[in-house]
Amino acid sequence: MNTYLSAVNQKLCFSKLLLGQLQPEHNCTAQLEEALCESVLSQLFCAYHHYLREVATTYQFNSPESILVVNDLVSCLASINKHPGEAQEMSNLEDNPDSWLCQMLSAYEQLSELPQQKAKTAESSPIAVTQVGQQDDAVTLGEKQLRRWYEHFEEMVDRHRSLMIEC
């Protein structure tokens, strides 16, 4: 059995559970809502990372752990003379800045960057303290956007899996 399939399913399940906590009836504080949103995004990113390896394993690529990005998937499968539509679709989605996948990956990348530091240092403090502010173009995550990414990702995975059964 493809162990990456289980890992993808687990991360999708975790994403869904976290999204459930973002419902209005839970009355989250702003910080909790931000933490939940970032957690959903992290789970979705991890699911995508595992999914790239799931596709490679399904098409009998022997070293799926070497796949880190979709371009790795495309080139690794090409090395064994396989050019599946699933890999091409994900590559096209990543290349399209208006696509849900490109937006999700950009948000994760932005979230992973360190906040910009301001030049001000609190000189009256006994320890050197530098004020850290949010980036001007910082990603703002919301439940609706994350749910949309989740739904698009889940739909793509389900559709691909139904096509890959024959592999």
Image (tube, grey):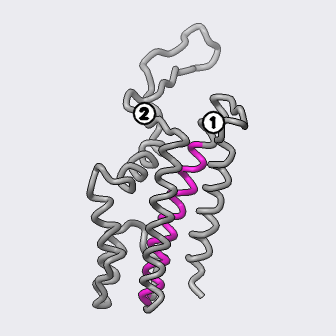
Query: Does the magenta portion include 30?
Result: no
- Quadrant where the N terminus sits is bottom right
Quickly name the residue at label 2: 138
Viewer-nearest residue: 141 or 128: 141
Q: Position of residue 80 (x, y in %)?
A: 32, 90
Q: CA distance from mark 1 to mark 2?
A: 16 Å
Query: Does the magenta portion include 59?
Result: yes
Secondary structure that dominates the magenta span = helix
Label disc, if present, on residue 151 of the rendered structure: none
Give the residue displayed 48% in from the left and 44% down from the top: 145
Q: Position of residue 162 (x, y in %)?
A: 47, 81
Q: Which residues are magenta?
A: 37-61
For label 2, the crowd category at 10 Å Cα-Cα, with few meaning under 14, some 14 to 19 and many 20 or more, is: few
Residue type at tag 1: Glu
Q: How many numbered circles are shown?
A: 2
Viewer-nearest residue: 105 or 28: 28
For label 1, the crowd category at 10 Å Cα-Cα, with few meaning under 14, some 14 to 19 and many 20 or more, is: many
- Say what secondary structure mark 2 lies in: loop
- Say what secondary structure mark 1 lies in: helix
Q: Earlier in the sequence, mark 1 or mark 2?
A: 1
Occupied quadrant, residue 60: bottom left
Q: Position of residue 103 (x, y in %)?
A: 38, 49
Give the residue displayed 57% in from the left and 20% down from the top: 128
- Give the residue furthest to the right: 26
Q: Is residue 12 above or below residue 124?
A: below
Quickly name the residue at label 1: 33
Q: Position of residue 125 (x, y in %)?
A: 62, 12
Give the residue displayed 67% in from the left and 48% down from the top: 20
In the visual, does 107 lie left or right of 92? right
